[in-house]
């Protein structure tokens, strides 16, 4: 087995520091700190674990190191520490997390292989841990190897943190409240979660007929989100929400946090602002209320309602925000068939062109082949941007989002890459991503890495350039140059084929990825229940927003195509964690899968298209 000789460089989206109870911390020089080992998640062949070092001594230190050893398990890669050794393993601090103030803690995480044995919980040794401490029997409250969305407690806030603990504080909702569906009356429109399961519950509510309930939490960053749209820089907003713990739950601290879109500086957490804190109860509704001022270089993302406990379930209701709403504040609140938040239904170009009828049906566009690296740069340093320019011009004219497809893929890449050294290849990959993002900074979504599951078509040239962590490095580059895009790990038919392999690959990337793309070319014959179970499983294990990226049903029998659409499409549309659906072609005879067209060349629809028009597209 090779020696682990990385560091894995820290990204804001992969931070295990972020969490309501976790701050950047330091070890004591005259006493030892407490170290805990916790399993964050596990599956048949592997696991995600984290180690938390808490400085419960009387003085700080500016560095730390710990070590541990397995009997059967082995480490496969990690984040937020410098790792070395080959069982035993050693972890030392990185430049940005070596300082641990008194009473605070640092957490780092890693993925491991079980090697046919149960997930082990070894003792942690080293100068940081009083010579060895026992592992935790439950998940540590600071683990965030997946999507991070809490605020580090050391982040400076531009407004004071308000702690509200009264169930009847006399608060009055501002007259200019512009929160849409704050009372959870229109299903879960504008409500969401960073992870875990969010449902509309009628079992308890502060007013109206329902509230939002989050359950199945396994980390403190698993929280409820609320989307208020854009906010105006420099303006102060009065923000409030009522919370209540699930029955039988002991009191727990809950925070309200404002979150801007991530910027390009991975060493700071200025995007997070704590708005309010309350000790919540299962016996009464309590108010979280405070003031938030939008600032910084990136737009507003959402508010997060999160608990310091890793496992409590809780309700939220009557969200309000008073202040000046930006013009786009209600853009995401329109309802759709079935009453859920409206999602995009997109499609691709047709034989390299955008048909004039495209906008009649679709509100998102993906280049089928024009945006692939091999199409744009078939000759080294000679770009053919014209076809992609036409797509972006069309999208801007009609105000629909573009999803780039794809940055790095083992197929349809420039053949001249095969003649380059690893160093040259790395430089060319970065140049390609940089130049694309510079030309199209308004790209909404990007299939950053495509079909990387072993046995599919992983980019061997990228692995040659960057080593075994090539996927993470490609996502780092995409984040650096396209900071405002949603970065997607896309793969082939992961609903039906290599399902568990894709889950393991996605989990290994931690927060380098923003979302996952589920190609859906071969779902014909799958029932609605089978499709939903697979999507639920991906969400529950990966915890990332989902895009159905390449859906089609290829069959010349109209009724077979219709019946499959009727089985699958409502699952996509109604699933709370599916953000949009891109159908892969729509003109009969000009699609990748034979028989998958939805209209004929003259515009006459097939029955599946008529059904889509009547139930989804025209709603």
Image (tube, grey):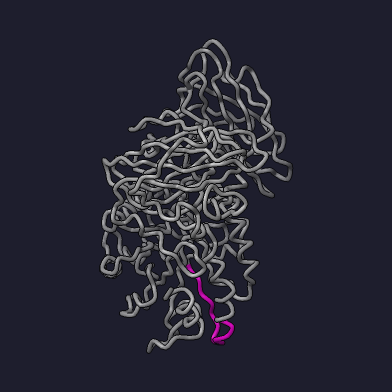
Could you tell me residue 442's position as x and y percent? 30, 57
Residues in magenta? 550-561
Q: Can residue 390 be seen in this view?
A: yes
Q: Does the magenta stretch include residue 155?
A: no
Front one among 15 and 387:
15
Residue 322 to residue 132: above or below: below
Front one among 521 and 260:
260
Could you tell me residue 5's position as x and y percent? 52, 34
**Which residue occupies the extreme top position in the image?**
30
**Which residue occupies the extreme right position in the image?**
117
**Left or right: where does residue 16 sit relative to residue 73?**
left
Quarter in which the C terminus is drawn:
bottom left
State the residue at coordinates (73%, 41%).
118
Q: Is residue 551 magenta?
A: yes
**Callout count:** 0
State the residue at coordinates (55%, 76%).
565
Which quadrant of the structure image shows residue 391?
bottom left
Could you tell me residue 529's position as x and y percent? 65, 67
Q: Is residue 435 visible?
A: no
Quarter in which the N terminus is drawn:
top right
Front one among 9 and 42:
42
Which quadrant of the structure image shows residue 246?
top right
Residue 187 to residue 337: above or below: above
**Left or right: where does residue 233 sit relative to residue 220?**
left
Residue 390 to residue 432: above or below: below
Front one among 404 and 236:
236
Could you tell me residue 567's position as x and y percent? 59, 74
């Amino acid at each position: 087995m090779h020696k682990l000789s990385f560091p894995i460089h820290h990204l804001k989206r992969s931070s295990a520091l972020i969490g309501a109870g976790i701050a950047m911390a330091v070890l004591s020089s005259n006493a030892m700190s407490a170290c805990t080992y916790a399993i964050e998640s596990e599956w048949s062949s592997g696991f995600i674990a984290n180690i938390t070092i808490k400085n419960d001594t009387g003085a700080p230190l500016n560095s730390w190191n710990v070590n541990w050893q397995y009997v059967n398990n082995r480490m496969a890669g990690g984040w937020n520490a410098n790792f070395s050794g080959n069982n035993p393993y050693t972890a030392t601090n990185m430049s940005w997390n070596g300082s641990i103030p008194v009473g605070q803690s640092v957490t780092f995480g890693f993925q491991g292989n079980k090697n046919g044995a149960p997930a082990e919980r070894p003792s942690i040794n080293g100068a940081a841990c009083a010579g060895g401490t026992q592992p935790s029997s439950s998940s540590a409250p600071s683990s965030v190897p997946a999507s991070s969305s809490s605020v580090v407690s050391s982040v400076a806030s531009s407004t004071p943190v308000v702690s509200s603990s009264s169930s009847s504080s006399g608060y009055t909702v501002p007259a200019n409240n512009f929160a849409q569906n704050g009372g959870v009356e229109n299903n879960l429109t504008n409500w969401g979660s960073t992870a875990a399961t969010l449902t509309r519950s009628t079992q308890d509510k502060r007013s109206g007929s329902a509230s939002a309930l989050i359950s199945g939490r396994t980390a403190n960053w698993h929280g409820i989100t609320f989307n208020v749209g854009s906010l105006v820089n420099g303006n102060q907003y009065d923000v409030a929400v009522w919370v209540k713990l699930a029955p039988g739950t002991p009191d727990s601290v809950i925070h309200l946090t404002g979150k801007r879109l991530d910027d390009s500086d991975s060493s700071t957490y200025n995007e997070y602002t704590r708005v309010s804190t309350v000790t919540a109860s299962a016996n009464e509704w309590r108010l979280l209320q405070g003031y938030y001022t939008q600032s910084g270089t990136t737009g507003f993302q959402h508010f997060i309602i999160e608990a310091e406990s890793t496992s409590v379930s809780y309700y939220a209701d009557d969200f309000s925000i008073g202040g000046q709403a930006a013009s786009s504040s209600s853009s995401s609140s329109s309802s759709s068939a079935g009453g859920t938040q409206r999602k995009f239904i997109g499609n691709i170009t047709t034989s390299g062109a955008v048909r004039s009828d495209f906008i009649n049906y679709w509100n998102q566009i993906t280049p089928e082949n024009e945006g692939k690296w091999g199409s744009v740069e078939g000759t080294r340093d000679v770009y053919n941007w014209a076809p992609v320019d036409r797509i972006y011009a069309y999208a801007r004219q009609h105000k629909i989002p573009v999803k780039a497809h794809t940055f790095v893929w083992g197929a349809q890449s420039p053949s001249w890459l095969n003649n380059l050294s690893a160093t040259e290849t790395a430089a060319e990959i970065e140049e390609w991503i940089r130049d694309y993002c510079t030309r199209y900074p308004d790209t909404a979504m990007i299939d950053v890495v495509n079909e990387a599951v072993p046995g599919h078509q992983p980019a061997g040239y990228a692995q040659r350039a960057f080593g075994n962590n090539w996927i993470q490095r490609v996502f780092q580059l995409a984040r650096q140059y396209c900071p405002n895009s949603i970065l997607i790990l896309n793969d082939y038919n992961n609903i039906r084929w290599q399902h568990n392999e894709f889950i393991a690959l996605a989990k290994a990337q931690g927060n380098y990825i923003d979302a996952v793309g589920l190609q859906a070319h071969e779902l014909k014959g799958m029932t609605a229940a089978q499709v939903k179970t697979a999507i639920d499983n991906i969400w529950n294990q990966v915890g990332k927003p989902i895009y159905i990226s390449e859906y089609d049903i290829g069959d010349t029998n109209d009724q077979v195509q219709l019946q499959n659409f009727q089985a699958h499409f409502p699952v996509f549309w109604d699933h709370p964690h599916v953000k949009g659906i891109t159908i892969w072609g729509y003109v009969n005879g000009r699609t990748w899968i034979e028989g998958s067209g939805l209209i004929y060349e003259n515009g006459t629809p097939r029955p599946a298209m008529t059904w889509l028009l009547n139930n989804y597209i025209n709603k």
